[in-house]
Image (spheres, rainbow, N blue to C red):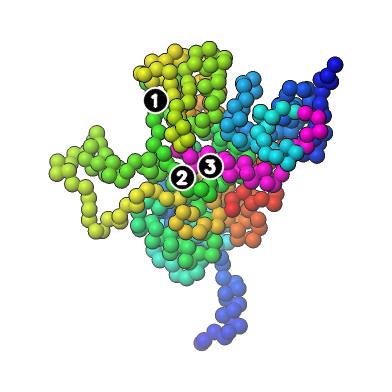
Amino acid sequence: MMETVQEREQRQLNRKPRIATASLAGCFGCHMSVLDLDERILELAELVEFDRSPIDDLKDFTGPVDIGLIEGGCCNEENVRVLREFRKHCRILVSLGDCATMGGVPALRNTLSLQECFREAYCDGPTVYNPTGLIPNDPEIPLLLDRVYPCHEVVRVDYHLPGCPPSAESIWQTLTALLNNRPLDLPYELIKYD
Amino acid sequence: MQNDTVTFVIDQKEVRARRGQTILEAAEQAGVYIPRLCHLKGLTPHGSCRVCTVRVNGRYQAACTYPVADDLVVENDTEELRTLRRDLLEMLLVEGNHFCMFCEKSGHCELQALAYRHSIAAPKYPHLWPRREVDASHPDVLLDRNRCVLCGRCVRVSRDVDGKNVFGFVGRGPHRHLGVNSRRGLGGSDLSADDQAVTVCPVGCLLRKRTAFQVPVGQRRFDRQPIGAEVGAGAGSPQPSESPMQ
């Protein structure tokens, strides 16, 4: 039986808010911090539906999403593509953690040229064995950017949550504030860059 | 005889001060915190970081160098000055290579603490990622110029307190950096690990080796209390209206 217009509207009203997450140039530590919510993760599962995310292994968006959490900055063209998709699909985009907000540890290479990085990684590094001296150049490998960019230098970002990783408590308070349309007002102890 | 006390107004509060004091000193005595980075009690004021900028009778002045006088009207904790200081701090953060996540000084760092106090979630300016030299030649002290904010504290303390003149500034503009009084680097200088110059660095540029990460997270200097909390309310305490994350 087809649903009526009223039924469809009611279903959309009842639908849970949707969350998407991604790890770009990050270490998955921020995702671990989400799991660090412990038993509150059950509460979160009650509150929201997970869309594209490594947590449910969905690789593509199923539709518009309310909140997108981005871990990691952009170090290659693949990161940029994913980030732009997130911006397109997410009503609110949150930079999660130091890599997303300022580049983080991957940005250590930003003081060096790309050429120097490649030479160190594939030719001159103390543990490298590469007699041909070739630097991987397969079209399957995403091209590296000239440096690592924080997310807000690539797309518009609505909120920044620093930390390496941000504590589970700060992620919880951020999500619940955004889901309940409350202003984000984290206490002093929760804003940390480490 | 000239009267030794002066009365001036800071943030609508009338304050009595000793003639010859700076605005920063007098305000601190009266329980009004003015954020500062390059200034340190007991040292000749440097006036270089401009984080302590206030408005004196409407004009921008560095509170650490400006002497008190009768009838001064000083603005300190205003939205305009908080924004100005936040911008200065963000510029300092993007000008060097500050990786708080693995820095030994994290939790004790005054630049980080000032950024926390001013609710900086991420600097809005693009990072410069300059190439800076690390000097690990000294057996007991590490010099990492990536974190230097050119406050000049080590320069002043080494000269005025330690009497050794180990440090000095070299170059101009964006090339200005911390120089060491020896061709062989820090290891060839007179610096010893007990020198005051090593302890006054507000950031993680000068560090005593083998002392890192001794205080657990949660008990570090700025983990629970914002910088300046011991002085009083003052400027930069997060305002309920300013969402820190946006």
Task: Using a 10 Å C-alpha cutoff, classify the residue at mark 1 as few (fewer than 14 neighbours), some (14 to 19) or many (20 or more).
Answer: some
The numbered disc on residue A110 is none
- Which of the 4 image quarters holds residue B81? top right
For mark 3, give the secondary structure.
helix
The residue at which mark 1 appears reads as B135
- Locate the N terminus of chain B by quadrant: top right
Q: Is disc 3 in the same subunit as disc 1?
A: yes
**In the figure, is residue B15 to the left or right of B142?**
right
What's the residue type where badge 1 is placed?
A: Asp
Q: Sequence-wise, which precedes: disc 2 or disc 3? A: 3
Disc 2: host chain: B
- As measured in the structure, the alpha-carbon distance from the residue carrying label 3 to the one carrying label 1 is 24 Å
Q: Quadrant of residue B229?
A: top right
Which residue carries the number 3 mark?
A: B91
**Nearer to us: label 3 or label 1:** 3
Asked if the residue at tag 1 contacts the one at tag 3, i.e. Cβ–Cβ closer than 8 Å, the answer is no
Does label 1 lie on the same chain as label 2? yes
Q: Earlier in the sequence, mark 2 or mark 1?
A: 2
Q: Position of residue B105 (x, y in %)?
A: 51, 30
Q: Quadrant of residue A128?
A: top left
x and y percentages locating residue B149 in the rendered image: 51, 33
Evaluate whether label 2 is on the same chain as label 3: yes
Find the magenta span and give its range. Answer: B69-97
At a point 49% along the width and 16% down the height, the residue shown is B165
For badge 3, the amino acid type reads Met
Residue at the disc numbered 2: B127
Pointer 3 chain: B
- Of all chains, the one bearing label 1 is B
Rendered position, A155 above or below B119: below
